[in-house]
Amino acid sequence: MSADSIPYKVSFSARRKRFSIRISHDGVEVRAPLRASKRQIARILKQRKEWIETKLALVGDLPLVPQPEYLEGERFSYLGKRYRLSVRISHRTGMGLVAGRLVARVPEALTAKEQPLFIRDLLFDWYESRAQVVLEKKAREVAASINRQPTRVRIRRTKSQWGHCTPKGVLQFNWLIMQAPLAVINYLVAHEVCHLQHPNHSPDFWSLVEQLCPDFNKQRIWLKSQGYLLAI
């Protein structure tokens, strides 16, 4: 599809109430409510055309992030530090940090083609489980400091959001953030916790963010400029 010379694709969702536009190396994606019309989508694209073209130019200047092969010796980030992957044959499978290495324990029966996929799944599960422990602990501690508590802390892998606070007080985090430096993670947690008190981006919201994370702007800029690198 295209509108005013801008190629795009559309994804519809019954849960979505508003339009949003995602720009990536894959192009332009319009995320629309289920019953959105072609005319509404075309109008949104026309209104945001200048912004879209600017973002596409910026994305075009960014290098593509190489796809990992999940092999012995590759390096992966955790809390801002790089760890070399070590593959070991074992009856007990799993992933963990051991003596400064990210150790993947895999069964002997795997073929050369199957092993990287098995390691990838172990890696994903490990990041997700670490995120649940680390981010939930941080979120509840920060929330307690402003006399709030989330109803739940949920970990997911999403394409466009690092964090989200639902109207019901559920905090959601993208586990890919576990690759970022700790200061960036602390900012993200503070940002979402502040939405428990201010469900907007008002001056009061940003004032509370600064109170919880004095260098928030530095970390915010890092996430905006370097976040695309947090991909595995």
Image (cartoon, rainbow, N blue to C red):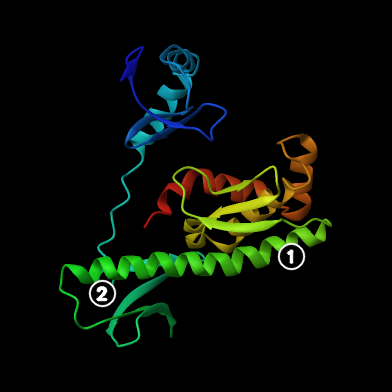
Question: What's under tag 2, amino acid-wise?
Answer: Glu
Q: Secondary structure at mark 2?
A: loop
Instruction: Identify residue for label 1.
Output: 141
- Residue at x 66%, y 51% (from the top left corner): 170
Residue 81 in view (yes/no):
no
* Relative height, residue 79 to residue 28 (above, below): below
Is residue 228 toward the left or the right of residue 86 in the image?
right
Give the Cα distance between marks 2 and 1.
37 Å
Instruction: Identify residue for label 2.
Output: 72
Q: Secondary structure at mark 1?
A: helix
In the rendered image, residue 217, in percent from the top left (x then y), is placed at 65, 46
Question: What's under tag 1, amino acid-wise?
Answer: Glu
Residue 106 in view (yes/no):
yes
In the rendered image, residue 171, in percent from the top left (x then y), is placed at 64, 52
Give the number of the mark in front: 2 or 1.
Answer: 1
In the rendered image, residue 103, in percent from the top left (x then y), is placed at 36, 79
